[in-house]
Image (cartoon, rainbow, N blue to C red):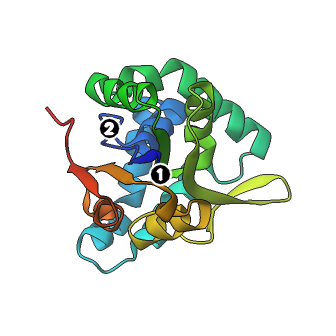
Amino acid sequence: MQAIAFFDFDGTITNKDTMLALAEYRKGKAGYLMGMLRLSPSLVALKLNLLPAQKAKQLFLRHFFGGMSAAAFNKLCEDFSENILPSLIRKDAWQAIQQHIANGDKVVVVSASAENWIAHWCNKNNIPFLGTRLEIKNDMITGIISGINCNGKEKVSRIKEAFNLADFETVYAYGDSSGDKEMLAIATNPHFRPFTQ
């Protein structure tokens, strides 16, 4: 029977949060810092557990990307994937992915990041992916998450929608945060922060 390996993206495959990196890529350092200053009340509320993570994420997405056409946003994501993302990939994580592929295992990226900006990298490397989906209205990015943020329990729900885990003798999972604990719990071989240096 085949094995399957689920990899979180931000902080596991990459060395930083790609949503933040994408925002800085779009706005530049000064524009990014100004935006974070404006969002600071919601970020403080999030830290104090006064604001749900999904709501805080939507405020961030709306501020930095809301009102962009879907085509312009996807082009931004593609350019980010080509120009910035390669420098954020952890070498050890990439080697682990390559080892799984060499062993004939199925590798899947499962991320709270939006599918828009992980798609190009995953497709380029022939890796299936599950990620947060963003609402598009009148061909514009609204900043609203379509459905539920792909984090925590939702990672497991999305995995089980896409795969019958009983088909796999071994289930690997790689994660680095509390948002991965449910995914790690369904694995026969869980790995928490294996690539952090």
Place of residue 147 in the rendered image (x, y in percent of width and height, measured from the top left):
62, 71
Q: Quadrant of residue 14?
A: top left
Disc 2 residue crowd, few under 14, some 14–19, many 20+, Cα 10 Å: some
Q: Residues within 10 Å of mark 1 (few under 14, many from 20)?
A: many
Q: Nearer the viewer, residue 83 or 147?
A: 147
Mark toward the viewer: 1 or 2: 1
Q: How far across and how far down the image is residue 1, in percent? A: 46, 48
Which circle marks residue 16 in the picture?
A: 2
**Which amino acid does the dot numbered 1 rest on?**
Val
Q: Nearer the viewer, residue 80 or 1?
A: 1
Q: Residue at x 55, y 71 (%)?
A: 148
Q: Quadrant of the C terminus?
A: top left
What label does residue 96 carry, if any? none
104 or 69, which lies in front?
104
Q: Are marks 1 and 2 in contact (CB under 8 Å)?
A: no
| Residue topped by disc 1 | 110
50, above or below 153, in the image = below
Judged from this view, the residue extending furthest toward the left is 197
Q: Amino acid at mark 2?
A: Lys
Q: Is residue 58 visible?
A: no
Residue at 70 percent across and 38 percent down: it is: 74
Residue positioned 56% across, 46% down in the render: 129
Q: Quick check: 80 left or right of 74?
A: left
